[in-house]
């Protein structure tokens, strides 16, 4: 075998290996972007509920913290964080909630925009779409 054909075989082999790694990386990245499912989070102590909000199929709140009470209570937790999914199961993004009496117009750290009042919960909410 000549050195030219050996070099050509190596180049083709490296090209195939690189292509396979790119495909594997893209597949893994799309799976990681979706994140864990509500069922997986619930298995690890998260509180997952179907909120009465159009377009939200599931909301999961951090383990041990539960979810905001409905109707709101004056002495509820200062803040909550939730992960949100559509009714079809697609990941929507993150929600950060601040109790209404503690919100002072500060910008949302996730987006730089303002929070909006969620009257059902009595909390100001900031959404960061994923």
Image: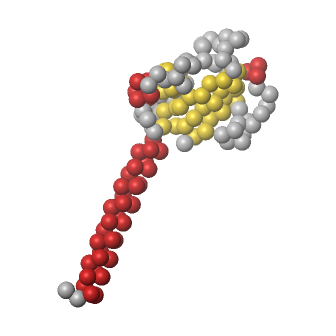
10 up-or-down from 91: above or below: below
Residue drawn where x is 41% and y is 55% of the image: 26
Task: Give x and y (percent) for residue 30.
Answer: 43, 48
Task: Give x and y (percent) for residue 38.
Answer: 44, 29
In which quarter of the view is residue 31 placed?
A: top left
Q: In the picture provided, is 49 more to the left or to the right than 4? A: right
Do we see residue 50 in this rendering?
no
Residue drawn where x is 67% and y is 11% of the image: 73
Residue drawn where x is 29% and y is 81% of the image: 8
76 up-or-down from 4: above or below: above
In the image, 19 versus 2, the foreground residue is 2
Which part of the image, by quadrant, shows the C terminus? top right
Do we see residue 12 in this rendering?
yes
Which part of the image, by quadrant, shows the N terminus? bottom left
In the image, 60 versus 21, the foreground residue is 21
Residue drawn where x is 60% and y is 32% of the image: 95
In which quarter of the view is residue 98 placed?
A: top right
In which quarter of the view is residue 44 placed?
A: top left
């Amino acid at each position: 075998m000549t050195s030219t054909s050996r070099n050509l075989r190596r180049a083709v082999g490296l090209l195939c290996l690189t292509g396979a790694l790119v495909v594997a990386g893209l597949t893994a990245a799309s799976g990681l972007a979706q994140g864990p499912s509500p069922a997986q989070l619930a298995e690890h102590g998260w509180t997952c509920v179907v909120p009465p909000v159009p377009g939200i199929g599931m909301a999961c709140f951090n383990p041990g913290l539960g979810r905001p009470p409905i109707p709101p209570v004056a002495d509820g937790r200062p803040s909550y964080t939730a992960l949100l999914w559509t009714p079809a199961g697609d990941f929507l993004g993150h929600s950060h909630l601040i109790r209404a009496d503690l919100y002072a117009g500060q910008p949302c750290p996730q987006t730089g925009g303002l929070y909006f009042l969620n009257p059902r919960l009595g909390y100001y909410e900031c959404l960061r779409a994923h």
